[in-house]
């Protein structure tokens, strides 16, 4: 497939420091659409010299930090024009991902992993460069937008609709989702009563009930128990076979090693290494 045939993402992107929830993107493809098998070498995501810059208003400069007097000065100064600080989170990242890839993204805290995933999902506009995707990217984060005050049941239905499933498809998948999540009778309780692990399991169960063209998973597997991790890994392998590309951010390197066929190591917003898991993880650990 030529690059020109891929979808250029920036058109539906939000402002980087606008943290309000974004409206759902144009109706996603039907459930079966992504499952049409594509040749293994088809590019699904092209990231071309991507730069992402956050703008933080009212931030203190280095000289102003530290003590109560400075803190008071900062508060007083906000009555004037707020200072603006730029955080250059991604600095010229380029790579191509293909159908069937499961790509682990690793790096220290603050290296830009979550930012990269959000940019691929179309939630952050590039400062420079571009992201091209073939199909609809879906970001499954630990903060994926389900409603805490609603029951698990309602959230399963809501989440499925949000992914573009029809009422009939929701009915067909409902039992499987609840069973996979392993939350049992808690499905009748509000999500606010769930432990973080239970919430993460339900979110993963909902998101993985649909075949995705590009699925971006940010630490969602970090809180599950051993049994759930194994089931999730099997599900990710299955998604890769069904023509998808999976990106996985995880601090647990075992999860990356067992799940991914490629690893990108980010360091201070740049790619430090990109290659097979054994090589990259060995270098990262050394
Ligand atoms: N909304 C934001 N506004 C301003 N700066 C941000 C914002 N989100 C992230 N950053 C900054 O961008 C850089 C990259 O952050 P990011 O969250 O992408 O890193 P990460 O590798 O995912 O970190 P972690 O492993 O801790 O989750 C950091 O310097 C961070 O402080």
Image (cartoon, rainbow, N blue to C red):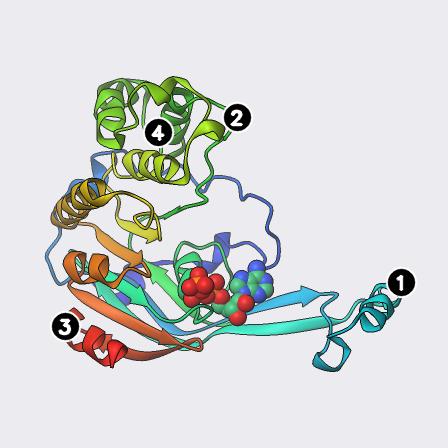
Q: Residue at x 35, y 29 (%)?
A: 160
For label 2, the residue is 149
Describe residue 128's horizontal placement relative to residue 74 as left or right. Answer: left
Instruction: For label 2, count other residues whose C-alpha is less than 10 Å away and answer few (under 14), some (14-19) or many (20+).
Output: few
- Asked whether the viewer can see residue 285, the reply is yes
Location of residue 128 with respect to 196 vertically, above or below: below
Res. 164 image quadrant:
top left
Q: Which of marks 2 and 1 is nearer the N terminus?
A: 1
Q: How far apart are marks 3 and 1 (CA)?
A: 54 Å
Q: Residue 160: which disc? A: 4
Q: Which of marks 3 and 2 is nearer the N terminus?
A: 2
Q: Quadrant of the N terminus?
A: bottom left
Q: Which of marks 3 and 4 is in front?
A: 3
Q: Residue 79: which disc? A: 1
Q: Which of marks 2 and 4 is nearer the N terminus?
A: 2
Q: How far apart are marks 2 and 1 (CA)?
A: 37 Å
For label 3, the residue is 278
Residue 129 drawn at (x, y percent): 44, 73
Callout 2 touching callout 4 (CB < 8 Å) = no
Q: Distance between the residues labelled 3 and 2?
A: 43 Å
Q: Residue at x 17, y 69 (%)?
A: 277
């Amino acid at each position: 497939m030529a690059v020109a045939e891929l979808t250029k993402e920036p058109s539906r992107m939000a402002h980087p420091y606008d943290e309000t929830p974004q409206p759902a993107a144009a109706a996603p493809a039907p459930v079966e659409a992504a499952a049409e098998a594509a040749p293994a070498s088809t590019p699904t995501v092209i990231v071309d010299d991507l730069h992402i810059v956050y703008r933080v208003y009212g931030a203190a400069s280095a000289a102003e930090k530290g003590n109560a007097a400075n803190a008071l000065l900062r508060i007083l100064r906000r009555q004037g024009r707020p200072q603006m600080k730029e955080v250059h989170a991604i600095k010229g990242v380029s790579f191509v991902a293909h159908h069937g890839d499961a790509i682990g993204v690793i790096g220290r805290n603050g290296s830009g992993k979550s930012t990269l995933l959000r940019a691929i999902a179309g939630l952050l506009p590039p400062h420079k460069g571009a992201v091209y995707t073939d199909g609809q990217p879906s970001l499954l984060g630990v903060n994926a937008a389900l409603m805490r005050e609603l029951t698990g049941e309602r959230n399963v239905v809501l989440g499925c609709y949000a992914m573009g499933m029809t009422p009939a498809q929701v009915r067909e998948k409902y039992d499987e989702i609840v069973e996979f999540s392993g939350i049992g009778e808690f499905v009748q309780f509000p999500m606010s009563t769930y432990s973080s692990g239970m919430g993460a399991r339900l979110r993963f169960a909902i998101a993985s009930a649909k075949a995705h063209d590009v699925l971006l998973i940010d630490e969602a597997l970090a809180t599950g128990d051993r049994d759930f991790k194994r089931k999730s890994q099997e599900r990710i392998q299955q998604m890769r076979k069904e023509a998808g590309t999976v990106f996985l951010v995880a601090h647990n390197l075992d999860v990356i090693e067992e799940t991914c066929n490629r690893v990108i190591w980010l360091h201070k917003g740049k790619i430090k290494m990109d290659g097979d898991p054994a090589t990259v993880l060995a270098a990262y650990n050394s």
